[in-house]
Amino acid sequence: MKVFKGKIWAALGSLMDHAGGAPSTKASSAAVPDRALLADIEAAVERCTGSGGGGDDDRHVHEILFLVSNAPGAITFLSRRITARLEAARAPAAALRSLLLVHRLLRAGDRYFEQDLRGLWASRDLRIDAPRCSCSPLAAGVHYVIAGAAAPTGTCAFVHGYSAYLEERMQWVINQAGNLEPARSPPPPHHHDGKLPTPPSTSSSHDADADGESLLFKLAMCQRLLDLAIQLLPDNNTSASAAARSAFGIVLRESFKVYDAFTENLDAMLLRSRSLAGLSKHLRVSAHEVLRKASVQTPELKEFYHKCKRSNASSKTLEYPLVRVVTPAQASAMEPAAILEEDERGEAEAEANDGGGSPFACKMETTISTVWVEFDDDDDQDQEQKITGDGHSSKAVQPS
């Protein structure tokens, strides 16, 4: 009888535990995507990265975005599946299709999806920096570059260049106006070489330096992304691939927006350097580096767009921007030597205007008077008021 009662109590306890754990079970099932949903995502990834994918058809990309939007944790599964397919790909074409899928998802998703995908890239759940196609040392399990190894060519070279471009593109976002802008915030002003910043003299100078730092940061980011885009012009063999044409078309259109952002920020920087506020010394040195690089890069970008117009890899209907070439003379105007000479000339002029640095424009001397003043009282106050206006008459008395 005691055994029977013990079994009853055990059964009741188990039933109560099950009833109490039901809400947590439902919560966990909501947090973990359904197996059927994960299978659908993997099938859609297969259709995008398989031998038949890689064209301009975005139906499967939108299908993936729809599936991921139905389960919060599904984007992590998606990132890991794309990484696994990219690392398993030995043919350059297969690796290129996986990279192209990442690029399309980055552009087609909303800002929340874009933010989550960039976060998974930062945490290395999504890895796009090391495609293991047949020409890569990583394909054979070698994790270092052999000296004198042959550089990749053709489609394999395009895959590695496209991978480097996407690594940099992950640090950009699409703003509400549909334009690209750097996602990272620039370092605080005066934070260089690990030294503590010096306290600013006024808040206005600190704000001016912060604005200048932001401009120079955006300009440097634009130049880095444009450099990687210029290196991606496919050759005749590579342009025969539908995936390569699609990937290069996206890169080319993005380069237009990046160049527009570059010219806008460059004009703002040049205007600030000529204004009364100007730029501080370390910002002018950085501005000189930007202009020096631009004097080399802008002619290359102009030639790059000319080649794209003649190439079969790009569309003939695109509206190319008019590249404004930065001349070496413009860059030399902000050379450190010219900046130092200008500062010394300005200081010399300021000292000359201030009378050699003295607080007064002319020499002043102080003399002591020997004249004493004696005040007399008079009964006729009205007469004195007429004379002095204050009730007292005064006369100078020469001391004996």
Image: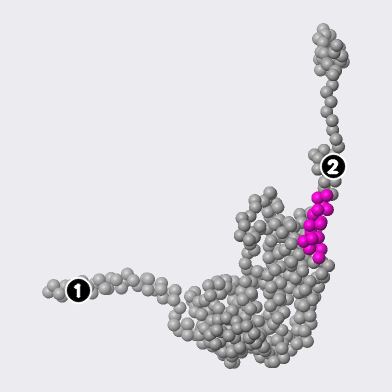
Q: Main secondary structure of the magenta part?
A: helix
The quadrant of the rendering that contains the C terminus is top right
Find disc 2 in the rendering and name its residue.
355
Question: In the image, what residue occupies the spot 84% across and 42% down?
Answer: 355
Residue positioned 59% across, 86% down in the render:
136
Q: Indicate the secondary structure of the residue bearing disc 2.
A: loop
Can you name the residue that lies furthest to the front here?
Answer: 147
Nearer to me, 158 or 333: 333
Relative to residue 286, is residue 166 depicted above or below?
below
Is residue 188 visible in the rendered image? The answer is no
Q: Earlier in the sequence, mark 2 or mark 1?
A: 1
Q: Which residues are magenta?
A: 332-348
In-front residue for pair 104/332? 332
Q: Which residue is mark 1?
A: 8
Q: Quadrant of the N terminus?
A: bottom left
Query: Going by the picture, which residue comes out furthest to the top?
Result: 379
Residue 235 in percent (x, y) is at 71, 88
- Does 240 appear in magenta? no
Q: Secondary structure at mark 1?
A: helix
Task: Give me the residue at 74% from left, 89% from top.
Answer: 312
Q: Is residue 342 magenta?
A: yes
Q: Which residue lies at the image location 65% right of the left edge and 69% below the top edge? A: 182
Residue 380: x and y in percent read 84, 9
- Amino acid, disc 1: Ile
Compare residues 62 and 93 and report the one nearer the observer: 93
- Separation (CA) of disc 2 from disc 1: 106 Å
- Specify the color scheme: one colour
Instruction: Judge whether residue 391 can be spotted in this image.
Output: yes
Does residue 238 appear to the left or right of 372 in the view shown? left
- Neighbor class of circle 2 (other Cα within 10 Å; few <14, some 14-19, many 20+) is few
Residue 198 got which mark? none
Res 229 → quadrant: bottom right
